[in-house]
Every structure is written in C-alpha cells, then in structure tokens.
Amino acid sequence: MLALLVGASVTAIGCGSSDEQKPAVPPPAEGVSIPEVREGEDVFAYIERVKGGFDQTLYKGIIGAANEFKEGDQALGIAAADEVSRKNARILLGNTKVGDLVDRPVYVDLVYDLIMQEVDPKALEGVRAFTLGELKAFVLGKPEAEIKAIMPGLPSDIIAMVVKLMSNDELIAVGGKVFNPLPGTNLGAKGYMGARIQPNSPTDNTDDIIWQVFNGWAFAVGDVVLGNNPVSSEVASVHAIEEALRDVLETFGIQDVMPHCVLAHIDVQAEVEKQFPGSTALWFQSLGSTAAANGTFDVTVDKMLAHAAERTDKYGLYFETGQGADATNGHGEGFDMVVHESRKYGFARALKQKVADAQAGAGNQPAPWVHLNDVAGFIGPEVFRSKEQLVRCCLEDIVMGKLHGLMIGLDVCSTLHMDVSLDDLDWCLEQIMPANPGYLMALPTKNDPMLSYLTTAFQDHVRIREKFGYKVDEKMWTFYQELGVIDAAGKPTDKFGDPKWVYLQYRKKKNDLRTDAEILAEADAKIAEITKRGVWIAQGHGQNPWDLNPELDKYIRFLYEDGKKSIWAELPPDFTDSIPAAVSVWTGSKNREDYILHPPSGERIHDDAVKTLEELRGKHAGQYNVQLMISDGLNALAITDQGHLAPYLEAVRKELEAAGYKVAPEHIVCVSGRVRAGYHAGEILFGSLPDKASKRAIVHIIGERPGSEHHAYSVYTTAPKVEVWGTEGTVDHDITKVISGIADTATTPADAAKATVTQLNDLFAVP
C-alpha cells in the first residue's frame, strides 16, 4: 500500500501518508444539473440539444453525474446536482451505443493508448452496436462463459460506465458469477476468499514482520501473498525484509505455493533482485490512471512495460490502486473517479498480457500470476466519507476488476478522519462479501501498526469463512492442517490462534535442538519485545474463534479513540514560543474541520503569511541552503509530545552543520500545514534567488500516523535546484524523500536526524 497507493510516490525511508493531496478544483455549488431528458435521447443528442454542438466538458460531467455521490467527484465539479440529475445521466448513458462512446474518449494519453491497444478489435466490434443499457442486461443475464467471451473487447471506460448503471445488488450479482483465478490455484475462484498477510513494522524490524506471519498462520489465514509495506526504500533494508519473508516460506517448503513481496517502488525491487538474485518473488507497484498520475509514482508506461518483460518466472506483478488517488494528486483531468479507477485496471490488464508474452518468449507456459487490489478508503473524507460510500466503491471495483479479467482483492479500509468506525468496517464486510472478491488484507488487528489506518484483521477472515462458507486455497489449507492449527475436518485445534506454536514448528524445521520449553520461552520474550515496539500480536481469541482476544480488543479500541483525539488536536497557543527562533505562518484552512475535510486548504501558505516568508527571504539573502519547517499535520500530538520534536531539532541541526550544510537559524512553524505547504514555502523562500543552478532544501517535520501508540511524526526532505523552486507547482512528492514513524518509542529522533542527512546527501548528489 500505498506502497501506499495514495501519493505513495514519495521516495521514502517511510511511506507516503493520507495527507498527501494536491489541490483539486473547488466544486461549483450546483454540480452537474440535468433537469430533464427526452424519450430515447442519448448522451450525444442531449449535448447537441442543450449546447448546439458537442461539448467535452458537459460530456465528462454527464458521465460523472451518473455516479453514486462521492465527495471526490463533487470536488471536481462533476457530481450530480441532485437525484433527478443522477437518474437522468444514467438514462442518457443507458441509451448511448458502446461504439459511439468508444469513439469519443473522455481523455487520451499514453495510458489510454496502451489500454486500447490491448482491447481485442474483433470482440469490440461485437459489442459496438450495444447500448450501455443492453450491455448491462447482457452482463446481468448471461452466464460467465458468455460474459468472458466479450470481456477482451470491453475498453476500460465502457466497463466503468456500465458499472455506473448498476445497483449494489446488481453489482453483487455480477461479482458473484465472474471469476479469474490465478494460474494453477483456486485463488480468486468462486467460493474462495484469500488473504494477503500485511506484516508491517514501524521500524522495518524483521522480527515484527515474521511474527505477524506466524500470527496469521496460527489462524489459518494467508494464501495469496506475504506483502510487507516497508518504511525504508533503501535497497539494503528492502533486501533484508525480502530475505526474512523468503526464509519463512522456504523453511516450511511453501515458496512455490505463496510468494512474498516488499511493496517498495518497483525500481527498488528490481535493483534488489539485480544485486541479490533470487531474493525477490512477486513485484509490486501502485498504478495511476493517466500518464501524469503515474508520474506522481515515478512510473511511466515504458518503464512498466520493461519491468513486465522481465517477469518470466512463476510470479509476475502485483498492483494497488484506489478511487480518488489521481484527482487528489492533481491529475483529475475533469473526469470521474470510477472511470479513473477502471483505467488503472485496464493498465494492469495490459501489463498482465505483457507478462504472458514474456513467459512465452522465455519458453515458459504463459500463465501470468498477476493480481490487484484497490485500497478503498485510504485517502480520507475528501474522496468519500461514509460507510455506504465505502461499500459502493468496493462493489464497483470488484466488478470492474473482474470484467477486466483480473484477480482482484480489496483493502476494505478507513482512515481515522472518515466517518467509518471499527464496527462500521464489520458492517461493510457483511455487505461486500456476497460479491466474492478474491482476497482481503490480513493483520493481527484492524489497526495497522505502521500505516495507522483501519483494515481487516485475521479474525475477520475467520468470521467471513464461517458466515459465507468461503474457502482457503487447498494447498495452504493442507499446510495449515499439517501445521496443526486446524484438524482434518477443518475445525480449530487447541493450537489455533497460537503464534508461539507456529514459531516452535519453524524452529524445528530449522533443526533447532533446544527443548520445546526453551523455544517457547524465547517466543514469549520475542512477543514481549515486539509488543513494546507497538506491533500487536493476537494470541488466542474470545468466546468464538473469530472474536479478537478481549484484552487486545479493548486496547485497539483505546488506540482508535486516541487516534480520533490526535486528528482533531491543535497546536497549543504557546507552542511557537517554545521553539527556538520560531517564525509563525499558517495556511488557508479556516479551522480544523476545514483542514480535515478539505485538504487543499492546508497546502498553501496564506497570503498574509506569505509576506512573513518574503521578509525572511530578504533577511537570509540566499546565504542558507537548508530551511527547517514544522507543521501540525494530521497529528499535532506527535509534535508536542515530550521527547519528540526537541531532540530531533537539536540533533538534525548538529548533523547537518557537521555535514557542511548551511542551516537557517529560524524554524518556520506552520499551523494547519500539510506536506505541500512545505513545497509552497520553498517556492517563496528559494524560487527567486539568482543562482538558479544551486540547490536549496526544505526539511519539513509534520505530525502523522494518528492511531498508533507512538504518536509518530515524519520528515519530508525536498532539495531541487532554485530554477525548479522557481516554477510554481513543479516541486512535488516525486522528488521528495521521507522518514516516517519518528517517536521516542519508534524510529528515534537521533536516528531520524542521521537518516535526514543521508537523504539530503543523496538529493544534493542528483544532477
């Protein structure tokens, strides 16, 4: 993940965060109004009637207005103004022929061109004469085999548009009959529900990571991939995690059953494999829907095609996407989130075919192991806020993924500033599961210990299997029986939910000659150490096998409430006075609610505060090349907690000056500041300096990760040339490095200070 999908392009000793959004176009108050339509009228006839000719903006607006309401579409001004307009937009689309829509693409670029290159022309010809309404009826009424016969001819935009016409029940009906299992498995087949174990650590500690794997296996969970989100994107760190995960799989002899994956940037994974052949298995990348959106991830079509061409062995590629990521990163291009999301699946479908071609070219059977999951809900309330919208998004994405011929899973998740609680997520799963997605995320609890968002726990899988009768892939189910956590009848044994038992089997496979008691004592000690680092291990269960241990459940709920408190916390009035040589600025956010619900408001320095930075620029007269900046971000407590900020400021200044950098004596303190507020500050401070070829850096300290016990903050470091700072809007996440998870109980301020200098050295070394 993100990997993290959302703004995850930041080169990191740490992942990007949910506050990384680019300004979106403010919504017109009225939205898209379609007060009436005529009998049999299609989209193009309507536009001709009301505009006197074709109008691309209205065209995009009608397509967007057909969506169920989501805040992300509203922000782009393409949400329906009311239910009548939404209904009428759907009527117009339903009356429009597929071929006419294909001939009028909403947006054309290199990603779109690739998507269309992979559409089968003969199959497309067979559906061109269908209206979208007729295509919807075909997909709803025909059996899987007939649907699969036309799927290669369906462009991504058409798949998106037909999904808009379906009710939730209709989406469930389609999701429940179209399946694209991974080669040689039942992963993604009807009646199966897989799991990606997501063993994340705030410090990339490999004990944290492998013990979460043991934990998942103790509940008979995990069959799709062991997929870690790394904190560091350095090759050595990523390699260490790859090797730890590979070792666990190889020790149990199941490396050909399930792959491992470290969700760093795909270039980093490729470099790890180059330096350490055989250490990687499945390769990952977040995808955008347009060439520009992929640029935010430092990805191009050509780059992804080249990586796909290298995937000649069993395991191919793994992708993450998410509705709203493109627009919130500044690449909405005037069309809606559903079409954007569908184009990502089209991109993935094209890359899947390239993997098949690469396998065939290497003399292997073309059987591309390629899958995808959307991260629905990770961005926040600016995309959608409610549990009902989360369910709708997931159902849309399941169907769009399946109609693209992909094995698609879900990260049914929520951030702490959405109106979706821990219990709401259970309700969402109940609504979504009849559509039978291929897999879900799986963690010891719903609270990710590194990313600090809410997702699915191991016990959720146990409950879903019990309620819906879903199965685990047979090869892994047999493994769990041999492991002893379930019996021959598939029922939990007395070892079910006991990660120490799994560790004992692991050590025995390693030919550990110690007694069971000695190994189990070591297991107790390791769990205590891991827990102290804020990584939760779920031992045992409640009254039912699918209930979380009551004590742990109570603690996770405490963290949830603390996360809510952190989200809404503000810097105290005297905070600036406590910072040495502080210069106070603020953004355009009117208040905390405005900041939370409208991220763009916190991404630019307020006009009145710009003058303060201009005065600082004049005072400095270009003599400094590093400026320290502090913002509250999404967790002011991360900044104000004792032992967090002050030790870092002291250490980083010493480290920077020792490395020869000229650090400005002042600390800029920004209220209601997001990551891009730092970029704007850099433009003001450095953009007009005369030495255009020299480099200048902003080191931006910002509160993040509400919901973990660490109250951790991050440091974003950006250091382009003056000429880049001087071009407004050019500086963005793709040229920024970040250190996440900084706290007295996680990555220490002293270690973060050293890492900051390392990152800055790397940035200054770039030509």
Image: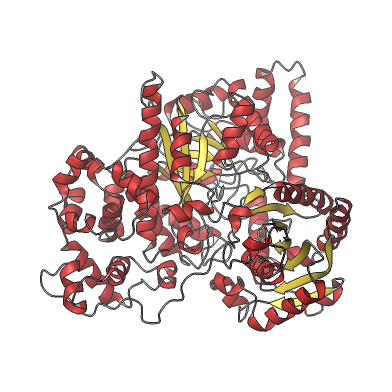
Q: Nearer the viewer, residue 109 or 59?
A: 109
Instruction: Looking at the picture, tell me which residue is in the foreground, 479 or 708.
Output: 708
> Quick check: 371 above or below 637?
above
Snapshot colouring: secondary structure
Residue 225's x, y, as percent? 51, 35
Q: Please tell me which residue lies in front, 353 or 386.
A: 353
Q: Position of residue 78 (x, y in %)?
A: 36, 71
Q: Residue at x 63, y 58 (%)?
A: 557
Q: Quadrant of residue 515?
A: top right
Residue for point 62% across, 52% down: 451
Q: Position of residue 202 (x, y in %)?
A: 70, 47
Q: Residue at x 13, y 70 (%)?
A: 41
Q: Is residue 662 left or right of residue 505?
A: right
**Farthest residue in the left direction?**
39
Q: Is residue 523 left or right of residue 660?
A: left
Quarter where residue 517 is shown: top right
Residue 410 visible from this viewpoint: no
Q: Confirm whether residue 505 shows in the render.
A: yes
The answer to whether 266 is drawn above or below residue 554 in the figure is above
Q: Position of residue 209 (x, y in %)?
A: 66, 38
Above/below status of 381 relative to 13 = below
Place residue 269 in its image quadrant.
top right
Decide which of 277, 548 is in the foreground and name it: 277
